[in-house]
Image (cartoon, rainbow, N blue to C red):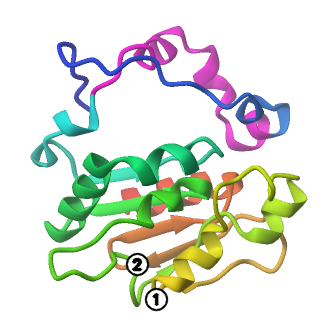
Amino acid sequence: MPVATNKILGKIPLDPESLTRQILDDQGTGKRYLDRAFMDRLKDTMKVSDAHIDDYDAIHLTGGHGVMFDFPQSKDLETLIARFYETGRVVSTVCHGAAGLLDVTLSNGDPLVKGKRVTGFSWPEEELANRAEAVPCNVQEELKKLGADYSTVAQPFAPYVVEDGRLITGQNPFSARAVAEAVVR
């Protein structure tokens, strides 16, 4: 992945709960947090508006509660996601990253998720995580309102991935590996 060195946005904040032992062990991300070169890349990041889609085959929206506040307020991100999708590239999300799809409109005026099979962090998982009062919206319900065919796995926090062509979504943090594998396929 190309890294812009002259167009810097700044440091990417990490949700402290994403560093819990269970997440680190189960998802294998512990190695990344111990990799100084990887962590240093998170200090100086490229602006979304500076991304050139011809340099990439896919865009991935990470999870974490913070993205529910950041992603839906970024017109540049919404535009980039629509361009990725409309030019035949993969759009993927995991967990709360699905919030980044809520305001994405295609050139025909339809929401990206309209008529698409998707998933994302479920409301029962939000309640089990004791975050229902802290989040700005119920992503599950908002996706349905936009015409998405939203589904979940029966067991909260079990891995679950939904693929609808080039749109790949994972329900929760434990779905991250399967989403990545689907994107690579």
Amino acid type of the residue that numbered disc 1 sits on in the rendered structure: Gly
Q: Residue at x 63, y 15 (%)?
A: 34
Which x, y percent locates residue 151? 63, 83
In the displayed structure, 31 sits above or below 176; it is above
Which x, y percent locates residue 184? 38, 56
In the displayed structure, 80 sits above or below 87; it is above
Q: Using residue 86 as the reference point, say whether residue 149 is left or right of it.
A: right
How far is disc 1 from disc 2 in space, using C-alphas? 7 Å
Q: Residue at x 20, y 19 (%)?
A: 7
Which x, y percent locates residue 143? 53, 77
Can residue 157 be seen here? The reply is no
Write the start and end of the magenta stretch as one range.
23-46
Q: Earlier in the sequence, mark 1 or mark 2?
A: 2
Label 1 with label 2: CB-CB less than 8 Å:
yes
Amino acid type of the residue that numbered disc 2 sits on in the rendered structure: Val
Which x, y percent locates residue 162? 53, 75
Residue 35: in magenta span: yes
Q: Give the residue pinned by disc 2.
A: 113
Residue 45: in magenta span: yes
Q: Using residue 178 as the reference point, say whether residue 76 is left or right of it.
A: left
In the displayed structure, 62 sits above or below 178; it is above
On residue 147, the disc is: 1
Which of the two residues, 70 or 165, is positioned nearer the viewer here? 70
